[in-house]
Image (cartoon, coloured by chain):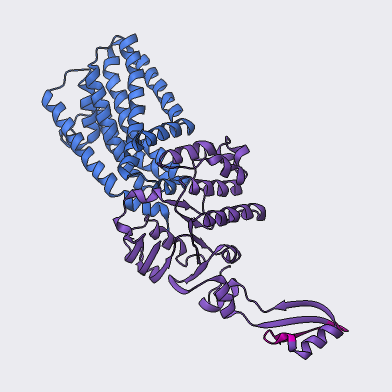
Amino acid sequence: MFEVADLRYRYPTGKDDVIRAISFDFAKGEIFGFLGPSGAGKSTTQKLLIGILKGFRGRVMYQGKDLASYGRDIYRDIGVGFEVPVHFSKLTAMENLGFYGNLYPQRIDVEPLMRQVGLWEDRNKRVAEYSKGMKVRLNFVRAMLNDPKILFLDEPTNGLDPQNARIIKDIILDYRAKGGTVFLTTHAMHDADELCDRVAFIADGEIREIDSPKSLKLRFGNRLVSVEYRDGATAKETFALDGLADNEAFLTLLRTKEIVTIHSGETTLDDIFIKVTGVRLHG
Amino acid sequence: MGNLGLLYRGEMLRMRRYNVTAASLVVVVIWIAMLYFAGTVNVGVSLPLVLFADSTMMSVLLVSVIMLFEKQEGATRSMLVLPISKSEYLGAKILATATSSVVTLVLLLIYAVGFRGVSVNIPGLFGAVLLAAGVFCLMGIVLTYRVRDFTGLLMSVFVLFLGLGVPTILEALEMVDSDWLTRLQYLNPMKSALIILSASVETIPANEVWTSSAYLAGLGAVMAWLAWRQFDAYAAKEIGG
């Protein structure tokens, strides 16, 4: 759906490129995660792909055509969920959605989605009266207004409690199941792990790795099992995951000791990110 | 309804909700009070001055305030990913501001013509208000591209008023008598606005009216070009890094 080759970008007032020759692609029906810490170039890349930042070098193709050849009509296909609230605070949620929705030739019936995200009862409240979480959910509904073919989401669960984050993630998965495509920029590795078919790690404007979360875990994970057990004091031993069923020492431990915990050495995306890029995601 | 109509309707709704309409109606009440206290003889002279202030400074303020509210709330970002053109986006703002100026004009005419019997070339006055409001609205848009917040806006409007408005008012009230100021004033678009507005109430040489109209139209074209051309840079700034 999108093909990006040798993309480079420098802000008009900047000295150096903030996006440095990145190449990737993602297909229809895919959730593609763009992961990296703040300032890595995630949001800039997203803005380049949705055409609101101009003047890049390299090639960006959308549905086989140069992105630059599309006019404003491309926004009929695209839904954009910004990280920060983007609504008129003195208008109600429905007035906001009505205003934006009317500018699209096609639009969804917002009631089911507003009910799903828990905002229907508060639909006639002014956005200024909404909590941060409610504004984030309204942002998401705004992004879905035009029944987009492709959804660009920037930190869609930022500021949400776990229950509402779950609802948003379920809607994203449901959207994908119906053939929708998602470009997700986030530093929330857990969300990416759960949602994305493939992820790209970006640091300092460069892509360091692209693969599915599962493949990354297999490639970078430690095939080890750690067993914590009580033998007077608490002790810990580590065994190779391969051939574990025939590992006598492991089996003896299980039979003779009081086991406290058993953990496989499967690594997290967070750890892999640090390993690959040498950059921490938080703090 | 096309995009321009929908955007215009949105602008009008927001002007009401953000109390911009209420504020401009309060200003109309102040203008009417000024005309009331101007006395029967002076009301014809005061009407163009009041309309001058409204269609120039108020137009700059109105459009800038609308855009700054939009900017402050991040809504500009959302507007940038809509299937609308920048001409439609800017056009709706100009139409909404011009509507406010026309409403003010109608209310002032009701008072001045209906209650004070002032003789006015009504079509001419409508044309003059629309031209002046359009030019200064465009100027307000270009100004807003350059200011960061409401404080910056107030400072810029203050400088604009001191630099262009005050000399025009002082000259109109015959409080200054200087040849060089009179000559310099030919470059002042506010002076041109006052000339075309006054032409509907009093007799002004035709060449002055046409020159002022042409000057304003030319300046309007330059401002429209700047507003259109500099929009992308403004948008990029709003989107941030």
Q: In this picture, is B71 found above or below B183?
A: below
B59 horizontally vs B182: left or right: right
Extreme right residue here? Answer: A232
Figure quadrant of the C terminus of chain B = bottom left
- The stretch drawn in magenta includes residue B3: no
Q: Residue at x 60, y 55 (%)?
A: A170
Any part of residue B35 in sight: yes
A206 horizontally vs B86: left or right: right
Q: Which chain is purple?
A: A
Q: In this picture, is B11 found above or below A219?
A: above
User: Residue A149: horizontal and vertical position, in percent?
Assistant: 44, 53
Identify the image quadrant of residue A240. bottom right
- The stretch drawn in magenta includes residue A237: yes
Q: Color used for chain B? A: blue
Q: Pick the residue in front: B210 or B78.
A: B78
Q: From which residue to which does the magenta span run?
A: A230-245
Q: Residue at x 43, y 49 (%)?
A: B77
Any part of residue A36 in sight: no
User: Residue A265: horizontal and vertical position, in percent?
Assistant: 67, 79
Q: Main secondary structure of the magenta part?
A: strand
User: Residue A223: horizontal and vertical position, in percent?
Assistant: 65, 83
Q: Pick the residue in front: A73 or A283.
A: A73
Q: Residue at x 59, y 62 (%)?
A: A191
A120 horizontally vs B92: left or right: right
